[in-house]
Image: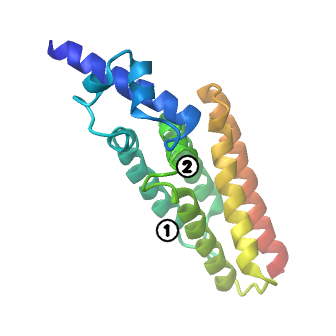
Amino acid sequence: MQVLKEEIRIKILESAKALFLQNGFDKTSMNMIAKKAGISKSNLYNYFSAKEEIFFHLTDRVHTEIRTVLAHLLDHESGEAFDYHKYLAWMSDKTIKILIKCREEMLLIMDCSKGTRYENTKQEFIFHLQQHFMQEFEEHNISIDDNCFMSHYIATSLMEGLLEPIRHNKSDEWIRKNIKMLIEYHINGYAQFFTDVIS
């Protein structure tokens, strides 16, 4: 009996995840989840009290992980001693691992979370990246007209660029290759930008 209950619980989570990814959190109902899982709505409530509980069960751990990775990505030394090649390798490895391991959960948080406490997560991450880039402009004494927009543009394009490969639901190797190319393009272009502006 316990095994059967666990199988039903897994079926509920898998069904809810598929519906959230397809429709978004706000357009998915408990009725829809019960129907897709092949159980009654009353039985569904024996496992989860609300769709919010299901959504957060699917996303809370991953949300913590990506916040930790982002914090580490932004916490690096800059200046003349900064080894961006080493940073590139480290950043690629960490980013690729979490995007491949948690691709669906990442999309739930970034693209499908309207109506939950995570609905502004993508914009919050973009803001933190933007602040990071603005700080680097200041550290390199770079004065750019409306550099707030410039840093916002760089942050937004990086975030959306990282999400785009996992939206296409292709193989792990395809995702790995494309994210690595994107990060190399971004970091090398960023380094060249600073070289050109400073020289």
Q: Classify mark 1: residues with Cα within 10 Å, few (<14), some (14-19) or many (20+).
A: few
Residue 81 can be seen, yes or no: no
Check disc 1 and report the residue beneath it. 75
Badge number at residue 172: none
Left/right of residue 21 with respect to residue 65 in the rendered view: right
**Location of residue 78 (image quadrant):** bottom right
**The disc labelled 2 sits on which kind of residue?**
Met
Q: Secondary structure at mark 2?
A: helix
Where 89 sits versus 76, above or below?
Answer: above
Q: Is residue 178 above or below residue 183?
A: above
**On-image quarter of the N terminus:** top left
Q: Which amino acid is tagged 1?
A: Asp
Q: Residue 176: x, y in percent?
A: 63, 36
Q: Residue furthest left?
A: 1
Residue for badge 2: 110
State whether residue 126 appears in this view: yes
